[in-house]
Image (spheres, rainbow, N blue to C red):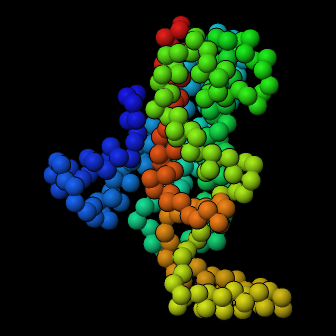
Amino acid sequence: MSERALSFEKFQSEQVAWRYGIGWTGAIEKDVRNAAQSIHSQTVMDALRDAVGLLAHQVSGHSRTPGALQFLRFGASRRLFMMWHAYRNVVIYAAPPARLEPLSGEESGELTRDLNVIYFNIRGTLDNLAWALLHDYAEENLKIPPARIGLFNSCITGDPRFKPLSQALDAHRDWNRDLADRRDPSAHRIPLTIPPQFLTPEEGPRYEELVNEALQAAGGLDFARADEKFEQTEHIGQFHPYFSHDIEKGIIPIYPTLPEDVGHLVEICFDVGNFFSRQS
């Protein structure tokens, strides 16, 4: 896989050139950006699916030790498969770039779960790849504390045996550092969430009123009325594709952030796969 083949900027440049002509530097209309985001996110989804098979069969077939096989076939590839299901639900079915209808309570719960599944397993996949590499090519490095084992840590980057891989990973180093703000909270601090809708100042009071009526109904054991009021809240406001963890750090756009993050991981999987195949 070529360097940054799954970069959003590549897809947006193609859409801009098609719509406005090569070399365009003016404003980009929303529908053009939405088209680029949609094509990019779906391309990443397909590449993520391909990465599952790559690690489960091709790369693990080149492994030299049972430990590497375990971390590739039953670690990284399983994580990628879980991510593929969660990612598909987010970007294809429930929260595509152009959606405006607020999320239902069920959709909001499912998307929050799926987003945390994705980011939790991005970190886990990177770690699984590092453990597999050490098992096959630098077993003595497994003696260091487990917390210091990582694909971008010195056990890989400082070992000359991994120099070709380390060079390939250069395109992802800044991403790996930046990702900690979105990846690590899902496992260690505040979980990620996707707001079901955004309200205008005029819509806020009506929303609050319906919630209070629902809570009062529930308190009086009138659950049918409570459900009715909560259902009405799902039709107020608009959905915008953002997620967050710490409220003080603000919101983060799902597009292109999520497909970009998954795209980096997929490219890394192919980089690691190329390293294993060259060693066999």
Q: Position of residue 163 (x, y in %)?
A: 53, 15
* Figure quadrant of the N terminus: top left
Of residues 19 and 47, the one nearer the viewer is: 19
Residue 161, placed above or below residue 148: above
Residue 72, placed above or below residue 37: above
In the displayed orientation, state which residue is furthest to the top: 280
On the rendered structure, is 253 left or right of 119? Answer: left
Q: Position of residue 96 (x, y in %)?
A: 45, 60
Residue 266 makes an appearance in the image: no
Residue 24 makes an appearance in the image: yes
Residue 159, placed above or below residue 245: above
State which quadrant residue 244 falls in.
bottom right
Q: Position of residue 240 (x, y in %)?
A: 49, 69
Q: Residue at x 54, y 60 (%)?
A: 252
In the displayed orientation, state which residue is furthest to the right: 220
Q: Residue at x 68, y 47 (%)?
A: 184
